[in-house]
Amino acid sequence: MDTESFIYIMDFVGTAAFAVSGALTGIRKKMDIFGVNILAIVTATGGGIIRDLIIGSTPPKAFVNPIFVLVSAITANIVFLFMWYINKKGTVIPGKAKSIYDKVFFWCDSVGLAAFTADGVHAGLAPDMMNKVFLVIFLGVVTGVGGGVFRDILSLEMPVIFVKHIYACASILGAIVTYSWYAVTGSGPSSLLAGFFVTVVIRYLAASFGWNLPKIKA
């Protein structure tokens, strides 16, 4: 499989995963179906839009190729209908439901972060930008965390990148691994997988062991 096809797959994985996390947040905030759709779309496309604006790719791909907006909306409506059905049936114990919600949200958020971090790095691997290491790493991080920041701001929450589980640091390390792997091997697919894997593993370990950056507890 060539690099472009692999990136396209990563785009779909990240879009669907972030759309789920956005939709779940909207449902938790008691938004109506329109609000849930908007939050899912913004979460799934926000980071990519910022990335495209930074590198001068205008209009951003989300507007040129609306397939990813469509995927986000379809995913959001599936999540909304599923949660509506569960709520109507009342078959889930509240405590158990929250535990399931937290796990689904965590994994979707982590997968979206990992996929878009790796994808963002590859967007900066054009020959004229390959030696601009800081820019390439930054593109990976902003693509990974941008949608989640928009999601949290629109839902009136402190962005998770500032408070919880080594979120942005996982993206930074994943971006560094993606860039370094590509610089050494020249392999697009394997570097995408390496960065994706590192980001997800760090997120999992941070959540499992309660790793957080130091902060002052006033």
Image (cartoon, rainbow, N blue to C red):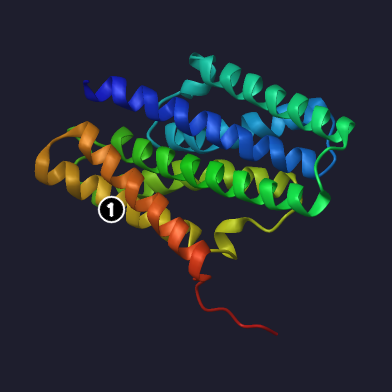
Q: Is residue 95 left or right of residue 76?
A: right
Q: Position of residue 152 (x, y in %)?
A: 67, 49
Q: Is residue 115 left or right of residue 87?
A: left
Mark 1 residue crowding within 10 angstroms, few (<14) / some (14–19) / many (20+): many
- Compared to 58, does 97 lie above or below? below
Q: Let me know if residue 127 appears in the view.
A: yes
* Residue beneath disc 1: 176
The residue under the point 69% across, 23% down is 78
Q: Is residue 194 left or right of residue 208?
A: left
Q: Dot 1: what SS?
A: helix
Q: Position of residue 115 (x, y in %)?
A: 41, 38
The residue under the point 67% across, 47% down is 100
Q: Nearer the viewer, residue 192 or 62?
A: 192
Q: Position of residue 141 (x, y in %)?
A: 42, 49
Q: Nearer the viewer, residue 27 or 40?
A: 27
Q: Which part of the image, by quadrant, shows the N terminus?
A: top left
Q: Which part of the image, by quadrant, shows the C terminus?
A: bottom right
Which quadrant holds residue 45? top right
Q: Let me know if residue 126 appears in the view.
A: no
Query: How many marks do you count on the picture?
Result: 1
Please name the amino acid that badge 1 sits on: Ile
Which quadrant holds residue 117? top left
Q: Nearer the viewer, residue 132 or 167?
A: 167
The residue under the point 35% across, 44% down is 196
Q: Position of residue 30 (x, y in %)?
A: 85, 40
The residue under the point 33% across, 47% down is 197
- Compared to 120, does 2 lie above or below? above
